[in-house]
Image: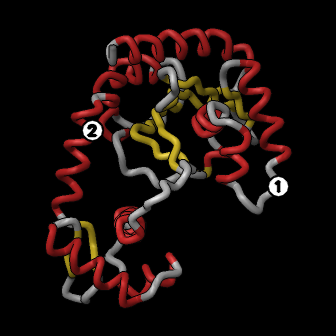
Amino acid sequence: MNQLPAQKVDGLIDGMAVLQELAADRNPVSGLALARKLNMSPVRVNRLLKTFAYLGYAYQTASRKYAVGPAIHVMAAQTLGASGLLRRAFEYLELLSHEAPTVALGVLWKKQVCYLFHKGQSMKMGAGIGGHSLYDARESSVGMALLAELHNDRIRAIYEGEDTGPMLEKLDQVRRDGYALLHHSDHYSLAVTIGQPAYAALAVSGVHSKDEIPALLEKLRHYSDMIEKQNA
C-alpha cells in the first residue's frame, strides 16, 4: 500500500472503495450489502451511490440495487486506450499462445492480481480480454513477480496481521532468479515483469515439464522488452 498523504480526503477514499466494490460485483448489489462488506455506514454508502448514479458511474435497477453505469465503461475504454499496454502486448500474447496452454498479462492491485488478458488453450484471442475476477497474488506467478518488486516493509504493510515469513523467502528467490516460477498441482506457471519500475507482468501457465521453462523464459523476457520499448 502507498503511504497516506498528511491531508487525505476521506470522502474520496470511501467513494473509490464503494466504486471498486460495485465494479467488482458481477450482479447488481444493494447499498446495505456494500456497506456491510466495506464496514461503512449504510447512510454514507447510499449517499455515495446516489452521487455516482448522478454522475453516470452507477445506475439503480428496478429492484433498487445498483450496477455499474456507462461512465465506468467509458473510463475503462479511455484508460486502456491511454495506457496502450494491452494494445502493445497483444501481438506478443498471440505469439506466446502458440507456445503454452495459457498466456496472461496482469497488474498488481493490493493483495490481488487483475488480469488484463488471460487466455486458455481452447479460447479465441478476443475471449482473453477482461472478464476475469481478481486473483490472490500469492497464488499467481504474475502476482509473485510483481510483489518481488516491492520492498519487504511495504509487503508487510500490505499483509498486516499475517505471517509473511514464508512468502518473503519465496520472493527473495524470485528476486535472485529474475522471474517467478510457481509449481501448481499438475503444472508450472512462469512470469516476468514489464518496465523499470515494473508496472505489469507477462506470464505463461499450464507448462508440464521443467525442460520447457528455459525456452519459454527467453521468449517472455524478449517479449517483455519489446512491449516496454514500444512504450518509450
Q: How is the image coloured?
A: secondary structure
* Residue at mark 2: 80
For the residue pair 165 and 73, the one nearer the viewer reads as 165
Horizontally, residue 227 falls left or right of residue 153, namely: left
N-terminal label among 1 and 2? 2
**For the residues carrying marks 1 and 2, which lies nearer the camera in this image?**
1
Query: How many neighbours does mark 1 have within 10 angstroms: few (below 14), some (14-19), or many (20 or more)?
Result: few
Residue depicted at x 58% and y 35%: 142
Residue depicted at x 63% and y 27%: 190
For the residue pair 214 and 202, the one nearer the viewer reads as 202
* Residue at mark 1: 163
Horizontally, residue 52 falls left or right of residue 222, namely: left
Residue depicted at x 28% and y 29%: 84
For the residue pair 102 and 39, the one nearer the viewer reads as 39
Residue 30 in the image: above or below residue 154: below
Q: In what quadrant of the picture does the C terminus appear?
A: top left
Question: Percent x, y for residue 70?
Answer: 16, 61
Horizontally, residue 187 falls left or right of residue 81, namely: right
Residue 26 in the image: above or below residue 154: below
Residue 115 in the image: above or below residue 194: below
Q: Which mark, by number, is residue 221?
A: none
Helix, strand or loop status at disc 1: loop
